[in-house]
Image: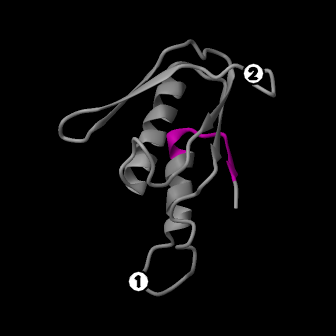
Amino acid sequence: QRLGVPISSAKVARFADSEVAVELLESVRCRDVFLLQPICRSFPASSVNDALVELTLFVSALRRASAQSITAILPYYGYARQDRRMAQVPIAAADVAQILTNAGISRVVAMD
């Protein structure tokens, strides 16, 4: 509100088997979209993985709705602590960044 930009409406639903469903309730065609989503355990996401899937599904919905660009604002970047190079261990922070890039995010703003 302080920026003078309205917050768009969206709906997140959970099925009985804990699958996530997201729905955009407004048109985003040809708009620059800023998606605020922490990758952490928070309501309604019950785990970091749930929050990551929810973010990925929102990005997919935004892309399919023809958003011009998608900027993810991540107040908490899950898996950020797993960024050291060790034998036979994935660098999870880089893998999550690759997932977000492949999903279609143009830019990421992460806060520390």
Name the residue type under label 2.
Answer: Val
- Name the residue located 81 percent from the left edge and 27 percent from the top edge: 3
Q: Are marks 1 and 2 in contact (CB under 8 Å)?
A: no
Q: Quadrant of the N terminus?
A: top right
Residue position marked by numbered label 2 in the rendering: 5
Q: Nearer the viewer, mark 1 or mark 2?
A: 2
Q: Quadrant of residue 19?
A: top left
- Of pointers 1 and 2, the one earlier in the residue sequence: 2
24 to 107, vertically: above or below:
above
Queried whether the magenta region covers residue 17, the answer comes back as no
Q: Residue at x 55, y 82 (%)?
A: 85
Name the secondary structure under disc 1.
loop
Indicate whether 15 appears above or below 102.
Answer: above
Q: Position of residue 83 (x, y in %)?
A: 57, 74
Q: Amino acid at mark 1?
A: Gln
Judged from this view, the residue extending furthest toward the right is 3
Residue carrying label 1? 88
Please say which color scheme the image uses.
Answer: one colour
Q: Left or right: 25 with respect to 71?
A: left
Taking depth in this image into account, of 110 and 41 the one nearest to the observer is 41
On the image, the x and y values in percent for residue 111 come to 70, 55
Q: Position of residue 32 (x, y in %)?
A: 70, 25
Which x, y percent locates residue 64? 49, 23
In magenta, the rendered stretch is: 102-110
